[in-house]
Structures are given as structure tokens and as C-alpha cells.
Image: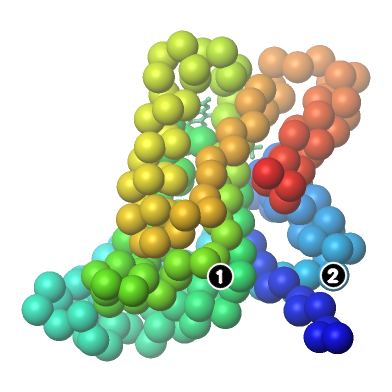
Amino acid sequence: MTAPTTKHTLLVVAHPRRDSLTAQVADHLHGLLKEAGATVDVLDLYTEEFDPRLTPADEPDWEDREKRYSPEVHAHMERIAAADEILLVFPVWWYAPPAVLKGWIDRVWNYGFAYGRSRPRLAGKRMRWIGLAGGPRRAFEESGLAAAMDLQLRTGISEFCGIEDASVLLVHDTELSGVPHELRPARVRQVLAASEEALHS
Ligand SMILES: Cc1cc2nc3c(=O)[nH]c(=O)nc-3n(C[C@H](O)[C@H](O)[C@H](O)COP(=O)(O)O)c2cc1C
């Protein structure tokens, strides 16, 4: 009998505040993953002061897919390569991930590593985009913005990099400023419960 293998998750968090709902969702998922026996590498892009600006050192050279990028980028690539699963937890800003997360994709999900090979290196991983949106689900669906985000993140990034097991989970109504204080704990619990879908779907 072969021993069960331990799942290793890279949990990427992109929010400037540790008391944000986004951070609470990340902590909640982290706890559940550990309870389930996974090992978890938490990559908090703000705490680690990740610089999202692409410099020439990390610009793809379309004639050299073996290019050595900056040491920082190669260290991030190793963290991705080590993971069976990549969970990205972020607030929805302008119907997109925050710039720090977009910059992490720009710099680290680079030519020769994440794409540009006939046998994609990241194929076989599981990827979940978990976006906290202030607005309601209905508004996202009726406007087409839910579909636009799905197309951009799942198709445009995950599938482009050979990751077929990818999806976008939007958790709605996460802006608590208009919610009476006494109702906020229940709303937070709803948000945390809704985020668990990312572990099971
Ligand atoms: C710069 C900025 C842009 C935002 N853009 C959107 C948006 O496009 N759609 C939306 O539903 N909510 C938007 N929001 C609201 C956030 O999604 C919401 O405040 C957040 O999820 C609340 O959770 P937090 O405590 O983790 O920040 C935006 C908030 C900020 C600060």
C-alpha cells in the first residue's frame, strides 16, 4: 500500500491590511487546509513587499525562453513549482485583481516557465482565484463583468499556462461599511463560509 501524499498549497494573499476581510478569508482557508493535512506556503504579497513593477531583468526575451530572470523571480517560480494547488485571495478592484497581484503574474508567470513550451510546466496543478467583491452577484452577472473576470483570469491566465483545473470564485457583498455594526459578525461568517467553496469545487 502506498502512503497518501500530502497536498502542498501556495496561498497567495493580496491586501494592504491584515484586518481586511480578504486577510480573514485567507486565514480561514489556511486553517482548513492545515486541518485537512495539507502543507501551506503563505505568500502575502504586501508583507513580503513584492515589487509588481516589471523591469528589463524580468522582461521576456522571445528569442530565449531559457533566459535567467532576477533571483527574486526565480525564488517565486520555485514556490509555484513546488505547489500542487495555487489559491489566490484578493479584493476585486475595478473588476480585476489589485496591481500587486497583476504584477506578480507579469513578473513571475514568465515566458519559458509558465508558458512558451509545448509541454506546459504548470499542467496538472489546481488553481482557484478567490475574489472578494463589494458588489452583489446579480449586478456582476447582469453586466457581464462576472463573465469578463472569468474569461480574463481562468482562460487568459490559468488555461493559457496549461492549468485546466482552474476556476474563479467571486464572494459578493463584502463591503461592510454600509452594514449595521451588530449585523457585521454574521456577514463575516457568511463570507468565510462562501469562500470554502474554493476548497471543494
Ligand atoms: C480601489 C478599489 C476598487 C474597487 N473596485 C470594486 C469593483 O470593481 N467591484 C466591486 O464589487 N467592488 C469594488 N471595490 C470594493 C471591494 O471589493 C471591497 O471593498 C472589498 O472586497 C472589501 O473587502 P476587504 O475588507 O478585504 O477590503 C473596490 C474597492 C477599492 C478600494
For the question of whether residue 44 can be seen, the reply is no
| Percent x, y of residue 126 | 57, 59
Residue in the picture at 71% in, 24% down: 176
In the rendered image, which quarter contains the N terminus? bottom right
Q: Which mark is residue 122?
A: none
Q: Who is closer to the viewer here, 149 or 58?
A: 149
Dividing the picture into quadrants, the one containing residue 20 is top right
Q: Residues within 10 Å of mark 1 (few under 14, many from 20)?
A: few
Query: In front: mark 2 or mark 1?
Result: 2
Residue in the picture at 81% in, 85% down: 2
Determine whether 96 is above or below 39 in the image.
above
Q: Which residue is mark 1?
A: 48
CA gap, disc 2 and disc 1: 25 Å
- Mark earlier in primary sequence (2, 1): 2
Residue in the picture at 78% in, 70% down: 38
Residue in the picture at 47% in, 26% down: 146
Report the residue that reaches farthest toward the front: 1
Q: Who is closer to the viewer here, 31 or 196?
A: 196
Contact between labelled residues 1 and 2, with CB atoms less than 8 Å apart:
no
- The kind of residue on which mark 1 rests is Glu
Q: Quadrant of ligand 1?
A: top right
Determine whether 74 is above or below 190 in the image.
below
- The kind of residue on which mark 2 rests is Gly
- On the picture, is 14 further left or further right than 72? right
Q: Secondary structure at mark 1?
A: loop
For the question of whether residue 81 can be seen, the reply is yes
- On the picture, is 144 further left or further right than 116? right
Q: Residues within 10 Å of mark 2 (few under 14, many from 20)?
A: few
Q: Which residue is mark 2?
A: 37
Determine whether 137 is above or below 102 in the image.
above
